[in-house]
Amino acid sequence: MTQPLTLTLSCPDRRGIVAKVSAFLFERGCNILDAQQYDDPETGAFFMRVVFAPDGQDADALRAQFMAIADELAMRWTLRDPSQRYRVMILTSKSDHCLADLIYRWRIGELAMDISAVVSNHPEQTYPAIDFTGIDFHHLPVARDTKLEQEAALWALIQSTGTDIVVLARYMQVLSDGLAAKLEGRCINIHHSFLPGFKGARPYHQAHVRGVKLIGATAHYVTGDLDEGPIIEQDVERISHRDSPDDLVRKGRDIERRVLARALRWRLEDRVLLNGRKTVVFTD
Amino acid sequence: MTQPLTLTLSCPDRRGIVAKVSAFLFERGCNILDAQQYDDPETGAFFMRVVFAPDGQDADALRAQFMAIADELAMRWTLRDPSQRYRVMILTSKSDHCLADLIYRWRIGELAMDISAVVSNHPEQTYPAIDFTGIDFHHLPVARDTKLEQEAALWALIQSTGTDIVVLARYMQVLSDGLAAKLEGRCINIHHSFLPGFKGARPYHQAHVRGVKLIGATAHYVTGDLDEGPIIEQDVERISHRDSPDDLVRKGRDIERRVLARALRWRLEDRVLLNGRKTVVFTD
Amino acid sequence: MTQPLTLTLSCPDRRGIVAKVSAFLFERGCNILDAQQYDDPETGAFFMRVVFAPDGQDADALRAQFMAIADELAMRWTLRDPSQRYRVMILTSKSDHCLADLIYRWRIGELAMDISAVVSNHPEQTYPAIDFTGIDFHHLPVARDTKLEQEAALWALIQSTGTDIVVLARYMQVLSDGLAAKLEGRCINIHHSFLPGFKGARPYHQAHVRGVKLIGATAHYVTGDLDEGPIIEQDVERISHRDSPDDLVRKGRDIERRVLARALRWRLEDRVLLNGRKTVVFTD
Amino acid sequence: MTQPLTLTLSCPDRRGIVAKVSAFLFERGCNILDAQQYDDPETGAFFMRVVFAPDGQDADALRAQFMAIADELAMRWTLRDPSQRYRVMILTSKSDHCLADLIYRWRIGELAMDISAVVSNHPEQTYPAIDFTGIDFHHLPVARDTKLEQEAALWALIQSTGTDIVVLARYMQVLSDGLAAKLEGRCINIHHSFLPGFKGARPYHQAHVRGVKLIGATAHYVTGDLDEGPIIEQDVERISHRDSPDDLVRKGRDIERRVLARALRWRLEDRVLLNGRKTVVFTD
């Protein structure tokens, strides 16, 4: 039996989109296994994700045939064979809790991806707790006056490794607007979040001073504005007055790694669609 | 502009269901606003909920036309105009936290339903904290040897009031198998839940003795087996060793009322479909 | 048997505070039933809450005797008989979900307080869903040029009714700095919270535009800066792209009422101690 | 400056315990940094945890002096220097998500313990994703007729390695009643939990068949009855009808590892006191 394929699309809403898409699949003997739609009443945009059994046809052939419908309806779309794994590059800095977690989930088969590379602005020996067997590690150091060159090297590596998705796993360098634009919709960052929010340095310390009772983390697509891209996932944990700033950092690690892993898994399964400044996430 | 209509259906899965349904709507000028599907790989059953703008047609006419497709695909289905509100009967006993909460949500327009009656096995003066203005209150007392008669009166009332949905809002009488069967898929109960579960009397006290760290509540459809019907919604709250059995009861009230309100709202919006011993809930 | 009493205190930390306090109680035959302490390593302040069986002595007598220790250690302290209920004034505006919830919890005995008055800047008929039997309702309208007079009337009412605690249950008027200062540590407000936070009008709409995945609420003491006083409690709920701004408002109501009720209950039980810009909450 | 020490105690409740303990510390110049007490109204047992600055005295000396009070009040007690790390043995079987997580947290300093050994009934090569550098790995295979011998070897290893605490990190062998008794209060297990609970094999599959909306995990002390010992910590995650049994297993891994890590950290910090069939957990 052939593996299911995944179709995602977004386009201006009009009558008959579902009818056209489902007729296209039905006429080719495909069986819809899962489908979710969403019609944004504010932007007038339509979003759809369909998983279907392709009845022996391959993704390339169907893609060629679907082009006509996609053009007619002005779709932004993908039709993918999930067995063709995304190539994911993980960027990190000193804190390695997200990196270690992603690598573990990848090793046990929970994240269906290929790791194209791990890139850090710190050398490999920074991570004694991590086993990089089978993973290409790249040290791309950066200083104030080499930021441009480092980013050029990073972009060259993204291209040469055929990287589809970039994950900023506590990577403490801000991407330039230019690089962020090149990676639109395929670069995911994780950062702490609080109610209320805090700007500036040492956010967990600020949260402690303010006496918040919940701390959280947000995974989002990267745009020029580092912490303001379209949100993919968020979660929180309860804290109390007994928690020191160090306790907040520790609890923050737990939230950050599970929020990032969830966001990445949804992206790998083509569940995250861009909707202007926000996302449509067809969760499982 | 005409109000959106809601179509729900379930049937044995086969190719082309979505194509047929969406073509039916497209040919009649209807625009799909929201749709969710689910294909149960285990039972081979297909589930769908579609909200669409009917382009001036009314629900009765579309229903008559849809019959042919529904018969062909052996569907269990509904096509409703949500502005035709469900008539909901609320049954309760002494504890009135769920009753008070449902009435409040109804009064502020959060639960779009008509209350066909409130029925209790206790008299109206049991509830000094509740304002029954505009609500028919029925006292149907029950004793060991009048259970049959009371249930007959209850069933007569359900029929005479045109009740669509029955909510057991802390109603402490077990429905007979016969009545439960008559109300299949339209009678919702709320009860406490724990990890691990407890059987028998004074469950919060048992949970306290066992030292659980979470307590919860489950809203489910009623079947012959009181607390074992298809689950619609569940939630929990954290407790500690400092919580007395009374504290558990108090926290339990909060969970019970919000879980029941959520489950009822989903049911009123035709989001809850029966799937054998469980449910498919197309949440918002 | 005499009812337990509650002692709360905060003072600069030094050796022997617990020894002195517990010796004081032991020498008078009192038995400690529950005690929590906290020593803030940053401010050097010490906090303690003790519940004890007074062995027949009354609160007044013990209070007089405790004065010496309290003075010696420069304590801010209270020694209360919980059966002497706090008198609570509830202020509200158009949205009555928090008001209705607090009144219900009071009626069933969950909130051990006396309601000194309900005050609104809207007339009583604004609240058809609420039964004010046994509650003094005061309509104190306010216009731009009568703000001063309205607040003077409010303060007079607080004094004449012997109000201990003021709850802003969706009261949409900002208290003046002067009134906020007079109510330090005894005026609780509830407001929505988001990650990230939003300033300005229509916050739920802003959160929707931003595509957040969690919405929350914060209960805090009122200070001059309306939404920035010491936080007492926070909670969140999950939302998705399907939630409209109206859905956010609806879900927000649920969070707001349960966070406010929790914060008020803790305050009534003397569990909330001020610690500069934040609080120490000795939760149960 | 000397490091803080931790005193924990439980005893039958009577007047003056806190006074005696705090006077003991005060007379020796010790400063209480954190203290929590709990008086169980049902069992009449008193529980206390005190962290204090010992003013240059060492734990051994204070322990010798405290003995008199402890005897007088019939205490079960510990007085520890947290810089003397507990020696922890981790037992595991095929699923290594909890093992990997504990090792990672240990490597980054989040779990302040020494790992005395990792023991599995499977060989080391079962865990290619884990780096055992600096950890003693023991393969203790077990077959139906060698269970007794394997457990004897396990007990010998616990003794020879000076193990204080044993963690069953998805160890799929049931300890004998004899071994469980020897490890009372120092052996922690993790297992899945559901509302309602399920007995028997393939629990996640059962939960799927039942259509539950929440799945959870419980960390508890091991007693003769494998999954029924005193509960230390529990947590849950939300699932939906879209989740397959495999999805439940995946989400279960996340809950299991964070619940186990929390429970172990609390145990390492002497926050978990036995109270008959349940625990008192003085959380941070």
Image (cartoon, coloured by chain):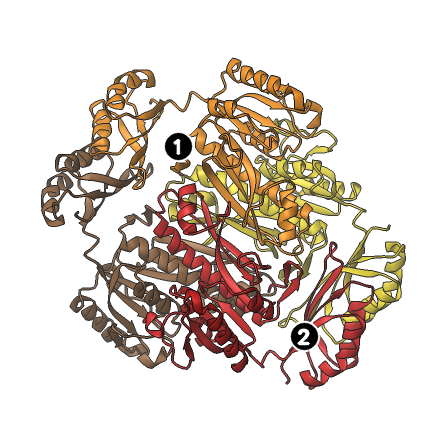
Chain colours: A red, B yellow, C orange, D brown
Residue D100 vertical position relative to residue C239 in the rendered view, above or below: below
Residue in front for this viewpoint, B276 or C188: C188
Q: Quadrant of residue D171?
A: bottom left
Q: Position of residue A196 (x, y in %)?
A: 51, 45
Q: Position of residue A275 (x, y in %)?
A: 67, 61
Residue C64 makes an appearance in the image = yes
Residue in front for this viewpoint, A3 or D92: A3
Residue farthest front in this picture: A145
Q: Distance between the Cα atoms at labels 2 and 1? A: 56 Å
For the N terminus of chain C, the quadrant is top left
Label drawn at residue A78: 2
Q: Quadrant of residue A137?
A: bottom left
Q: Position of residue C7 (x, y in %)?
A: 33, 27
Chain at numbered mark 1: C
Asked if badges 2 and 1 are on one and the same chain, I answer no
Q: Which residue is mark 1?
A: C274
Q: Amino acid at mark 1?
A: Leu
Labels 2 and 1 touching (C-beta < 8 A)? no
Residue C110 vertical position relative to residue B70 in the rendered view, above or below: above
Residue C92 vertical position relative to residue B41 in the rendered view, above or below: above
